Image (cartoon, coloured by chain):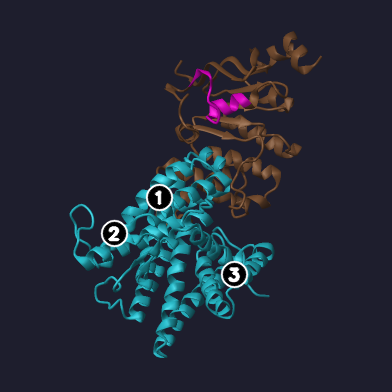
Chain colours: A cyan, B brown
Amino acid sequence: MHNTNPHKTARKRETIVNGLALLTIFIAAIWLNLLGESYYVNLVSRVVIFAIAGVGLNLALGYGGMVSLGHAAFFGLGAYVSGIAAFHFGDGSEFIAGFSGTNQMITIWVISIIVTAFFALIIGLISIRTTGVYFIMITLAFAQMIYYFALSWPTYGGEDGLLMLSRNQFPFLDSDNDIHFFALCFGLLIVSLFLTSRIMSARFGAALDVARMNEVRLATAGINPYPIKLTAFVFSAIIVGLAGALFADLNRFVSPDLLSWQMSGELIIFILLGGVGRLYGPVIGAALFVLLETFLGGYTDHWKLFLGLILLIIVLFAKGGLIQLLAGDKRHD
Amino acid sequence: MTDTILRIEALNKSFGALVATDNVSFDVKKGEIHTLIGPNGSGKSTLIAQITGWLKSDSGTIWLKSKNISNLSVAKRSRLGLGRSFQVSCLAMELSARRNVMLAIQSQQGSSFRFWKAISTDKKLTDEADAILSALDILDFADTRTNELSHGKRRELEVACALALKPKILLLDEPMAGLDPASTAGLTKFLEQLKTEIPILLIEHDMDAVFRLSDRISVLLYGKIVFSGTPDEIKASSVVREAYLGK
């Protein structure tokens, strides 16, 4: 009766769900800002930043099949780059290699990209030689090393963390204005979603998909899996690091907690809630996480008990996460 | 010598006290199908793994034309033109048949470090994939997910993936295993035509197909090549009869 192509309808449905997710976040921020609820505007920014981090981790975990329990390292490194640059800008002291600190986000982001890429390259070079539980443990071990290093470095606050006087600046925006800052985060989320979707639909993405599904097939097709996975790992770390830099600005505070394994776990939870290897999975997952954290957390300190239950239900009964419930199965063409 | 495409020289591999490959030498020449036969445990799988690069040899040399490939990675050997199919299907099961073939084409065309252009609309990949699928008569299944394909179609898809590499030689590990008679006949015919363009190192248990297809047959026993010759010589050889054909 109906002459519709099921592939097309499924794709349409997913596009609608994705669009609605972004639109809801955007409207929520605008509306809360009109109501003058700056606390809640920042909460939406928190969702967006977590979503960026989730999108980044998804590149390694969801698409590349590399279950990293160490991505907090990159989140924290990005945050510390932001905090430390601001710290030296504040007291006019030397930052690195004779350069003074800066409060310009663009410069900070460039430094963050270099720093996270460097660490991801070293961690990846070693960890990607392994798989399964060994990969998980090696990434965790590296992250813990960086965590304890931050904890014991008194210059930058040690375990007390580092307070920032104000947010770093972005051209033409007043980043201390919460809706401006939200717009900045939202823009970066869209950029990271767009880049991830391009990468995954291109030749590199095709190779990464097969690296996850069947490494023997990939090598037999003439593509060495190791550099493909390593590159994805580094890209993933860069995106997570940028999210970390934004997170420092959001809270005007950086602490070793951002480097802790709990943070790595939370990033994984965003993906599990939303949908592993689905572009918008982490966006929906991060939104659900922050909603639960805020509203359940308002009732009880033990809200993570409920988070655990929800996670259990999703893992057992809806393996594709919320996005699968909303938009159907993952497709590959 | 220029007609020799693949040459194995004095290849060895031991696992502890077990000698899996014992001083094996043979070659595959242009235009021929050279078949390796041998009972289970005779060392065929080890030998394949050494040639394709999954196992490092203890000693010996593998030449692809005039290039020593003994120490190259699996991926590098594939790119240089060592196409293979597996005994047990080894494909990206969640992807369509076309996408499986496109992967091999993409590696053959150059770098996979391209991050921008979508492959789904890349004619250089899709058209070539469809041409190969149609050569194997499985174009109708191009959009079917591999895990929904029948066993026989998957075997053919593996050959298609190997061909997509524009190989200098094909290494087919029991391509007939589990095929129905009609598919076996079809594949046999296809390989007969193919060998004029691409020589084939065949591993096969279906003796009818082996005798029909092979130009030369080598018999592997306890990691050693015990006899090598034409199908007629093999049939006549008492060594082979005792050791392998069991008569």
Q: Work out whether B232 lies above or below B98.
A: above
| Residue that label 3 marks | A304
Is residue A197 something one can see in this rendering? no
Q: Quadrant of residue A86?
A: bottom left
Determine whether, in the image, residue B105 is placed left or right of residue B159: left
Q: Position of residue B205 (x, y in %)?
A: 72, 27
Q: Quadrant of residue A259?
A: bottom left
- State the quadrant of the C terminus of chain B: top right
Whichever of labels 1 and 3 marks the residue nearer the N terminus, that label is: 1
Query: Disc count in the image?
Result: 3
Camera-side mark, 1 or 3: 3
The residues colored magenta run B46-62
**Looking at the picture, which amino acid does disc 3 mark?**
Lys
Whichever of labels 1 and 2 marks the residue nearer the N terminus, that label is: 2
User: Same subunit under labels 2 and 3?
Assistant: yes
Q: Position of residue A294 (x, y in %)?
A: 52, 77
**Looking at the picture, which amino acid does disc 1 mark?**
Ala
Determine whether, in the image, residue B228 is placed left or right of residue A254: right
